[in-house]
Amino acid sequence: MSICRRLSALFLLVVFSVAAMSALALADDAMVKRGEYLMKVSGCHDCHSPKVYTPQGVPMPDPKRLLSGHPAGLALPEYDKSWTTPGKWVLLNEHFTAFVGPWGVTYSANLTPDKDTGTGLWTEAIFIKALRSGKHMGEGRPIMPPMPWPMIGQMTDEDLGAIFAYLQSIPAVSNKVPEPQLNPPPPGH
């Protein structure tokens, strides 16, 4: 093969490679945008983003801490435990990131890609398994109320993959969320 043919073949290979990479980048961008849309319409910010309040007292997701979960170090106020027995109240804090009910106390997880305190070490497969099994990282402790994992887990692999792609694209926030404090099961269960 002559030098001209080799150079032409190399040039075509480079052109096709760049075109393929551009197409993948556009597909990835579309997937991230789809994930962002799904997160918004599914109400994920309602529980996973700490809040700031407008002058009228309306809680809004804090843009500096989006999807970072319950703020580390934020203690819950005292409450009457008799209020949260079965058939009574479920309580939540002012950020809508901590929940108290018959199951105990649970906190919204940090969904940002922080490697130490969020989902930065998760893979798409682990994310999907967690939402389908109701287990942290797909095999750990149960994912507790009020997380609606039974409904979210019914999304398609494509939609869950888009959500994961979006979560991996947002700024990482270092925020170690407390572990849940679960009540013991009632006698006989």
Image: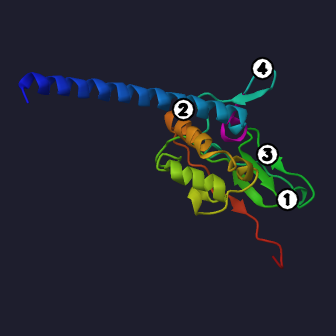
Tell me the crowding category of disc 1: few under 14, some 14 to 19, or many 20 or more residues within 10 angstroms, Cα based: few
* Residue with the mark numbered 2: 32
For mark 3, what is the residue? Answer: 92
Q: Pick out the residue farthest to the left.
A: 2
Q: Quadrant of residue 3?
A: top left
Quick one: 21 or 82, which is closer to the camera?
21
Task: Give the left or right position of residue 180, taking residue 3 as reference.
Answer: right
Q: Disc 3 on helix, strand or loop?
A: strand
Region rendered in magenta:
45-52
Q: Are marks 3 and 4 in contact (CB under 8 Å)?
A: no
Residue under the image location 59 percent in, 63 percent down: 140
Residue at 55 percent across and 40 percent down: it is 112
- Disc 3 to disc 1, how far (Cα)? 13 Å
Looking at the image, the residue that sits furthest to the bottom is: 188
Could you tell me the amino acid type at mark 3? Leu
Spatial CA distance of label 1 from label 2 is 42 Å
* Image side of residue 91 versus residue 11, left or right: right
Say what amino acid the circle numbered 4 marks: Pro
